[in-house]
């Protein structure tokens, strides 16, 4: 299910990025620990009262226009296009400015739920400074202070209250949901066409759960698939052309709805930071994934090229060593026949259930081979293991003392489980529960 989107809009210097960082700050710290997953200063995720959402700081989106007003307008339009709720931010210290009114005019015509936040209300005296913003016509302004962390509860309450209700995805369980992710021009559309093939069985273009997402369902060799958000993939409005980075958000929403993510890389161009970022998101979201290196026809090759490119992907995506790599050409058709079978395979791994007794045999053998760590005379004891869910496969180990588990031992068990059951192309998760 795709999470809703909250965008922050406002003229420069009102404190948008300060607030953005505060709201998503805690979660980022966790993500940053992992190698290869980098922080994005424009997109983030957060949650409030158990409601998860994406955030965009539109001020951070660089739009190639020197004129500030034009740039503010474009940012507001992006927010209107993408967000479910918009935080319109103004500045109590500076007061109401013509640029604020300009933003207000654009937002007013949008029909999107707007929450008006007056930042820099650093102390009670400043509350009075919020009154003049009533005239913007968005109801009661919520006073906040990014500098002092004040008012965030009220702000987020107001935001979450205005979020649309979550909609269940409409596809049956036996349909494999596939998202193709990658920069413009890597060949996503060409790959989709190739997958659909000559004898394509397109039922219809179905409007997805996400506003303006168009999915393409098809069937091949008795297996049903749907390619998620192909419209978003093809959409190249004028704003989009200017703001390539903006497509990250679309990618994230597609990933959330997918079972299998195809990370498409252009063999001619190699890997960039944004590829890592998006792949990292697929990993975090627990999706099955595979790397599709496209345009392999256009690369000059010798006997080492494939090996070198493989190594490059492994080096860049350390956290996704489980994802298979396929070198293809949408143009010549090279190895395209392997694509859907590989999608099937990783999808099967993603949904695989291991019988409890077999799982416990594997864990017991692993423990005998390499005993768990001990600390201050106490040794970790694994009593029992069970798989609690699929997509991704998630295991719970009942142990005497979870704090005795080491990262390296967890990785060892992860490997043992992986190898015993060939979990190809899917992350697996292991949780620890105390039970003596
Ligand atoms: P943006 O351009 O809207 O993203 O604004 P920034 O987040 O970069 O903030 C602009 C300036 O306002 C920075 O110098 C911040 O330190 C300052 N600022 C942000 N929030 C507050 C606040 O609550 N109170 C005060 N006094 N200054 C703030
Ligand atoms: P998208 O933006 O990721 O959807 O990429 P497209 O499918 O629109 O392809 C972008 C360009 O790359 C087009 O001109 C395609 O003809 C070209 N292209 C796609 N796949 C291949 C390929 O395998 N080899 C070569 N040489 N060109 C390709």
Image (cartoon, rainbow, N blue to C red):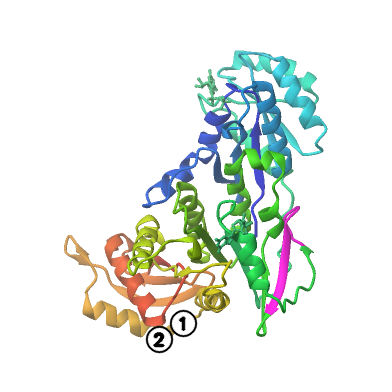
Left or right placement of residue 154 versus residue 280 in this view = right
**Residue occupying the point 40% across, 86% down:** 358
Q: Is residue 165 magenta?
A: no
Residue 376 x/y as whole percent: 17, 60
Figure quadrant of residue 325: bottom left
> Which mark is on residue 358?
2
Q: Are marks 2 and 1 in contact (CB under 8 Å)?
A: yes
Percent x, y for residue 351? 54, 76
Quarter that holds the C terminus: bottom left
Q: Residue at x 67, y 33 (%)?
A: 75
Q: Which of the pair 102/91 is nearer the observer?
A: 102
Observer-nearest residue: 153 or 89? 89
| In this view, 69 is above or below 332 | above
**Disc number placed over residue 211 in the picture, else none:** none
Indicate the quadrant containing the N terminus: top left, top right, bottom left or bottom right.
bottom right
Residue 403, image x and y in percent? 31, 59
Relative to 215, residue 21 above or below: above
Q: Which quarter of the frame holds ligand 1?
A: top right
Describe residue 3's horizontal placement relative to residue 318 as left or right: right
Q: Position of residue 260 (x, y in %)?
A: 56, 68
Q: Secondary structure at mark 1?
A: loop
Q: Residues within 10 Å of mark 1 (few under 14, many from 20)?
A: some
Q: Which residues are magenta?
A: 207-219
Q: Does the rendering let one see residue 416?
A: yes
Quarter of image, res 340: bottom right
The residue that mark 1 highlights is: 354
Above or below — where is 165 with respect to 198?
A: above
Residue 429 occupies which quadrant of the picture? bottom left
SS at mark 2 in the image: helix
Between 199 and 155, the residue placed more toward the observer is 199
- The answer to whether 323 appears left or right of 97 in the picture is left
């Amino acid at each position: 299910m795709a999470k809703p989107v909250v965008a922050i809009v406002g003229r420069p210097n009102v404190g948008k990025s300060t607030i953005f960082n505060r709201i998503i700050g805690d979660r980022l710290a966790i993500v940053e620990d992992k190698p290869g997953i980098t922080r994005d200063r424009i997109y983030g995720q957060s949650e409030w009262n158990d409601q998860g959402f994406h955030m965009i700081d539109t001020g951070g989106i660089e739009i190639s226009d020197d004129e500030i007003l034009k740039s503010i307008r474009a940012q507001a339009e992006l927010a209107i296009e993408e967000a479910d709720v918009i935080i319109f931010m103004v500045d109590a210290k500076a007061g109401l400015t013509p640029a604020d009114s300009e933003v207000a005019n654009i937002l007013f015509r949008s029909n999107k739920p707007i929450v008006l936040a007056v930042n820099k209300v650093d102390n009670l005296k400043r509350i009075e400074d919020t009154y003049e913003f009533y005239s913007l016509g968005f109801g009661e302004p919520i006073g906040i202070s990014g500098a002092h962390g004040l008012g965030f509860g009220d702000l987020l309450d107001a935001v979450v209250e205005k979020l649309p209700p979550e909609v269940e995805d409409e596809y049956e369980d036996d349909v494999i949901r596939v998202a193709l992710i990658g920069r413009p021009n890597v060949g996503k559309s060409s790959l989709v066409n190739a997958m659909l093939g000559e004898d394509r069985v397109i039922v219809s273009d179905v409007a997805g759960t996400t506003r303006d997402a168009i999915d393409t369902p098809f069937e091949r060799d008795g297996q049903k698939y749907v390619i998620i958000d192909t419209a978003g993939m093809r959409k190249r409005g004028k704003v989009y052309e200017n703001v390539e980075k903006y497509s990250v958000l679309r990618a994230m929403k597609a990933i959330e709805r997918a079972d299998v993510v195809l990370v498409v890389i252009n063999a001619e161009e190699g890997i960039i930071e944004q590829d890592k970022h998006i792949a990292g998101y697929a990993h975090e979201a627990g999706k099955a994934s595979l790397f599709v290196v496209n345009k392999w026809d256009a690369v000059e090759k010798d006997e080492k090229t494939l090996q070198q490119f493989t190594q490059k992907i492994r080096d860049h995506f350390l956290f996704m060593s489980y994802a298979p790599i396929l070198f293809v050409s949408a143009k010549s058709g090279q190895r395209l026949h392997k694509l859907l079978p590989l999608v099937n395979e990783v999808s099967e791994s993603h949904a695989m259930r291991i019988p409890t007794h077999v799982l416990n045999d594997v864990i017991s053998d692993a423990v005998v081979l390499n005993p768990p760590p001990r600390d201050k005379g106490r040794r970790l004891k694994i009593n029992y293991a069970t798989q609690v869910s699929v997509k991704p496969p998630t295991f719970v180990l009942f142990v005497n003392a979870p704090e005795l588990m080491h990262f390296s031992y967890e990785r060892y068990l992860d490997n043992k489980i992986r190898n015993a059951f060939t979990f190809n192309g899917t992350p697996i998760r292991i949780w620890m529960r105390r039970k003596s």
